[in-house]
Amino acid sequence: MRADRLIRVLLVLQSRSTVTAAELADDLEVSIATARRDLAALSSAGVPVYPQRGRGGGWSLVGGARTNLTGLTEPEATALFALIGQIHGVPGEAATAIRKLVQALPSTFRSGAERAIGSTVRDDAPWGAVHQGPPETVAELQAAIAAESAVVISYADRGPVGLTPLGVAARGGTWYLLASRDAGEPRLYRADRIRDVRRSGRAAVRPAGFDLTKAWAAAVARVEELRGVVSARALVHAHAVAALGRAFGAQMTPMGAAADGRVRVELRAQSAEALAEQVAGWSAAAEVVEPAEVRSAIAALGARLVSTYG
């Protein structure tokens, strides 16, 4: 609808000092001729919009007037877009709307909002317990990242530690802070174990060319490496392979069909005992065939169950 588009034109004008018809056409995904007609229509309707001719010219609001339509303060705008960054599975239409909202913010607010949205990654692969939502510390960390501020956190039962926050991420419903200490390699901190967050007053300096998605993937790979020290080969009934894969995540690798129709897989965990505990509940569908260390751990677990429950 044209009325909706004219409002979008006004939002763009209020967020920038000057905009050309070509830039407006690109933002609104219309032709340059349509953008020019919309600008002229606003002017005819009494909106104080005027063109500036020549090099560096374009369309502006009279006096460079730009307003914050919502009345949001900068901290409120940052908090809002940090919350948007926590939402899982934003569909295409919503993503487009979010981009338009960011562009409608005053330029002094816009960079912080963009950093808040870009400070979060979502990863649905399973790790640990599933929580209902992000802890309160996640929003505080996102706000610090948006403000490009270093932080001091109190983590679990440890003393305060100074960090450069690089991003927050959720995996299997659990939230993590990705941060570096003394310009070292980024590490993961469980957000629900962070007791307190405060800004240190020092600027946070990110590594040149830092990419949150790549850094998160590298951190996940390091954790998976630590979690997969011990491996075992197992035979799994075909109907259970997908469910077992969801339970083990990256710690299961299918290895093809076995002669008896079952599927050969490799399972990994941080110890033989941990692997035994994870696979014991799958005994009706999965049989560990090697190594003997893991089979013995499963047998010992079974003996304890029999001893306890008869």
Image (cartoon, rainbow, N blue to C red):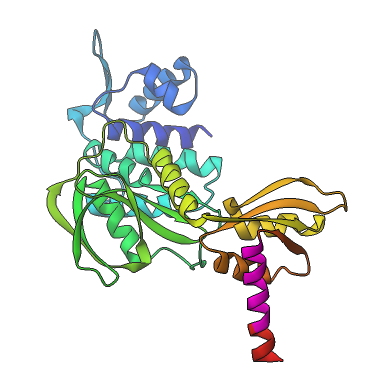
Is most of the magenta stretch helix, strand or loop? helix
Question: What x and y, as percent, mark residue 229?
Answer: 51, 55
Q: How many labels, in total?
A: 0
Left or right side of 168 for 291: right
The image quadrant of residue 284 is bottom right
Q: Is residue 128 above or below residue 219?
A: below
For this orientation, the residue located farthest to the left is 201
For this orientation, the residue located farthest to the front is 292
Q: Is residue 160 above or below residue 222?
A: below
Question: What x and y, as percent, mark residue 103?
Answer: 35, 36
User: Which residue occupies 75% across, 63% down?
Assistant: 287
Asked if residue 294 lies in the magenta stretch, the reply is: yes
User: Which residue occupies 23% across, 27% down?
Assistant: 17
Q: Is residue 46 visible?
A: no
| Magenta-colored span | 292-303
Q: Is residue 18 visible?
A: yes
Residue 56 or residue 111, whichever sits in front: 111
Question: What x and y, as percent, mark residue 286?
Answer: 75, 63
Asked if residue 118 lies in the magenta stretch, the reply is: no
User: Which residue occupies 27% across, 38% down?
Assistant: 111
Q: Is residue 189 above or below residue 253?
A: below
Question: What x and y, as percent, mark residue 101?
Answer: 38, 42
For this orientation, the residue located farthest to the top is 54
The image quadrant of residue 22 is top left
The image quadrant of residue 61 is top left
Residue 40 or residue 33, whichever sits in front: 33
Quarter of the image where the C terminus is located: bottom right
User: Which residue occupies 41% across, 63% down?
Assistant: 134
Left or right side of 219 for 292: right
Quarter of the image where the N terminus is located: top right
